[in-house]
Image (cartoon, rainbow, N blue to C red):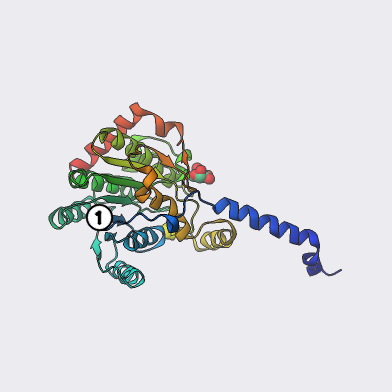
């Protein structure tokens, strides 16, 4: 019997079938955007990092539902390409690119200023843009670059747009966090690049924890305003969030990911669920899993005293800039 003959063994067929079932089960969500009839006509939505990956599919869904969609992207050319593609696919011409680099507080302020000047309302804000695996870098604002991009920039952006969002209530703020937050820790010196270990996704994990903590505190502050704020895990998705990883590692992830990871389109489902689903009307301060189920985040993300401290700390850090 040659080596390859083992693949014709019935056991092999049974194993592949089992694998296929496991993969399907793992990818199943309890909500399907295709069966959700919610229209967003007359609504305005902003999606950060919308030129690629999950963000692009979120923006595409909103455009399909008839929203005015603002793609908040760093790259003019890639952002424009995404806007053109979304307009073509959906036939919705109310899709616009606005440039922002969320790692820069100046850029966030300039972006927010323009939005406040140009937009009469804002019903959905999806903080999606993020990086992982960046080497240690300090931005010109003095922040550690991953913290600036994944947390402080989105935090400032949300706060600058908050009055407009409140005036547009009912409105929803969705922060794309990650299951990885469970391995995150809170240490306020991290924001300035101190006491950080740059192994794999460690820094990413910390930033994703801060996402949930501050979103929960925001939700508490927004009680009674008709604006909700929730966090969501999109699933393990092969996206450009890994663009800073070594090529061999990305190759390995691609290979494994082919079987086990979600596509960016599948990863967009739980954020879309948080942004548009009827059953989440009024639901706030919660964390949703990649299958759209309501789950508890890590204990640190449920510590309300810590949330107040973290939120105030981030406010102080970003207010001066
Ligand atoms: C980051 O979180 C993921 C998911 O929980 C975990 O697998 C990984 O080991 C964490 N990374 C580090 C360096 O702790």
Label 1 crowd bin: few (<14), some (14–19), many (20+), radius 10 Å:
some
Q: Which element is circle 1 on?
A: loop
Extreme residue toward the top, this view: 305
Q: Nearer the viewer, residue 121 or 211?
A: 121
The residue carrying mark 1 is 43
x and y percent of residue 70 in the render? 26, 60
x and y percent of residue 173 in the render? 30, 46
Q: Residue at x 29, y 56 (%)?
A: 40
Whether residue 244 can be seen here: no
Q: Is residue 216 above or below residue 305?
A: below
Whether residue 66 can be seen here: yes
Residue 71, image quadrant: bottom left
Q: Residue at x 51, y 50 (%)?
A: 29
| Tally of numbered tags | 1
Q: Assign the N terminus to one quadrant of the image.
A: bottom right
x and y percent of residue 179 in the render? 47, 44
Q: Nearer the viewer, residue 169 or 205?
A: 169
Q: Is mark 1 within 8 Å of ligand 1?
A: no
Does residue 44 appear left or right of residue 11 in this picture?
A: left
Does residue 279 appear left or right of residue 166 in this picture?
A: right
x and y percent of residue 88 in the render? 33, 73
Extreme residue toward the right, this view: 1
Q: Assign the C terminus to one quadrant of the image.
A: top left
Q: Residue at x 30, y 66 (%)?
A: 79
Q: Residue at x 20, y 56 (%)?
A: 111
């Amino acid at each position: 019997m040659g080596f390859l003959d083992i693949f014709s063994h019935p056991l092999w067929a049974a194993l592949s079938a089992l694998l296929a079932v496991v993969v399907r089960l793992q990818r199943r969500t309890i909500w399907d955007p295709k069966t959700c009839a919610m229209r967003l006509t007359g609504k305005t939505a902003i999606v950060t990092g919308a030129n690629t990956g999950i963000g692009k599919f979120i923006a595409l869904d909103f455009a399909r539902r008839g929203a005015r969609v603002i793609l908040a992207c760093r790259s003019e050319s890639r952002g424009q390409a995404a806007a053109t593609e979304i307009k073509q696919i959906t036939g919705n011409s109310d899709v616009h690119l606005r440039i922002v680099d969320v790692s820069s507080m100046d850029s966030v302020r300039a972006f927010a200023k323009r939005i406040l000047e140009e937009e009469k309302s804002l019903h959905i804000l999806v903080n999606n843009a993020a990086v992982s695996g960046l080497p240690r870098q300090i931005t010109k604002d003095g922040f550690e670059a991953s913290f600036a991009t994944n947390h402080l920039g989105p935090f400032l952006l949300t706060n600058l747009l908050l009055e407009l969002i409140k005036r547009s209530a009912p409105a929803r703020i969705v922060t794309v966090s990650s299951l990885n937050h469970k391995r995150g820790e809170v240490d306020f010196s991290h924001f300035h690049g101190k006491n950080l270990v740059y192994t794999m996704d460690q820094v990413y994990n910390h930033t994703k924890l801060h996402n949930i903590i501050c979103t929960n505190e925001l939700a508490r502050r927004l009680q009674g305003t008709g604006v909700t704020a929730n966090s969501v895990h999109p699933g393990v998705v092969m996206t450009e969030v890994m663009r800073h990883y070594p090529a061999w590692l990305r190759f390995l992830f691609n290979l494994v990911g082919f079987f086990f990871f979600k596509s960016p389109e599948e990863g967009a489902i739980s954020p879309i669920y948080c942004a548009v689903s009827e059953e989440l009307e009024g639901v706030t301060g919660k964390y949703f899993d990649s299958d759209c189920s309501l789950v508890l985040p890590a204990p640190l993300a449920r510590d309300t005293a810590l949330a107040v401290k973290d939120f105030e700390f981030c406010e102080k850090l970003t207010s001066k800039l």
